[in-house]
Amino acid sequence: MPSLPTFSPDAFIDLALTNNVLKFGEFELKSGRISPYFFNAGLLATGEMLSLLANGYADALAKQMKATHGKSDELVIFGAAYKGIPFVAATAQALWNNHDINAHWGYNRKEAKTHGEGGQLVGADVAGKAVWVLDDVITAGTAMREVVEILDKAKASVAGIIVALDRKERGQGKQSAIQELSATLNVPVQALVDMDDLIDYLKQSEGNAEYLENMQAYRSEYGV
């Protein structure tokens, strides 16, 4: 059985490129901007990719627990439907296997269930808990604000948010969506990989001069 490397930005970027999760080129975004790269979390569709990403989330959460002296059995993690569901399930396993942290995990449905146990939340009881939310990328922050509202209705609070990628570009104002969200909720929002990591990766790779130039130009125009 092949051993999975410890999570690092370069290891993740390498694997993301191999699996076409990350592409360099020209891509039109919803905002109308022409981005020199595109990250498609929907293609995190292999055990290797999911395991590496989960290890990254688990490492970040374990550091947070250590920094705040939190009890390992009190950690609650939450996946934003739909992409966040496999992330949070795999991360719970990585926390247990790699860090001996027995996290509680759950997720939301897009539509509330009207039969059986009913409701919009599945998994761990989040009432009265401070919950860490996992997601892939925060673009405008709209989806994450919806998750925050769902948790608020369930009488839970947000301890922090961890995403796979931070584009580090401003939205309508001077701040990025992540900066705005962090300021609004007054909680930490961190990313495992950001645009500066992508630029550093290209600097260290051969034959990527055009991609590097486009990334640096985009960062200069839209970055925060």
Image: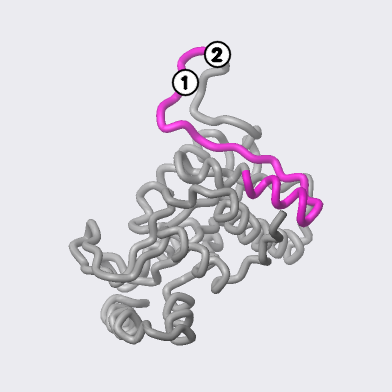
116 vs 200, nearest the viewer: 200
17 versus 154 height, above or below: below
Residue at x 32% of width, y 79% of height: 211
The answer to whether residue 52 is visible is yes
| Dot 1 and dot 2 residues touching (CB under 8 Å) | yes
**At numbered mark 1, what does the secondary structure look like: helix, strand or loop?**
strand
* Image quadrant in which you'd find residue 3: bottom right
Q: Which residues are magenta?
A: 90-116
Q: Quadrant of the C terminus?
A: bottom left
Tell me if mark 1 has few (under 14), some (14-19) or many (20+) residues whose alpha carbon lies within 10 angstroms of its own.
Answer: few
Q: Which residue is mark 2?
A: 116
- Name of the residue lying farthest toward the left: 32
Q: Position of residue 107 (x, y in %)?
A: 54, 37
As drawn, 116 above or below 78 = above
What residue do we see at 46% from left, 44% from top? Answer: 83
Residue 15 coordinates in the image, percent (x, y): 52, 64
Residue 215: image location, x then y, percent: 33, 79
Q: Report the residue marked by disc 1.
A: 113
Residue drawn at 48 percent across, 86 percent down = 204
Q: Nearer the viewer, residue 29 or 74?
A: 29
Residue 106 among those drawn in magenta: yes
Q: Is residue 52 above or below residue 211?
A: above
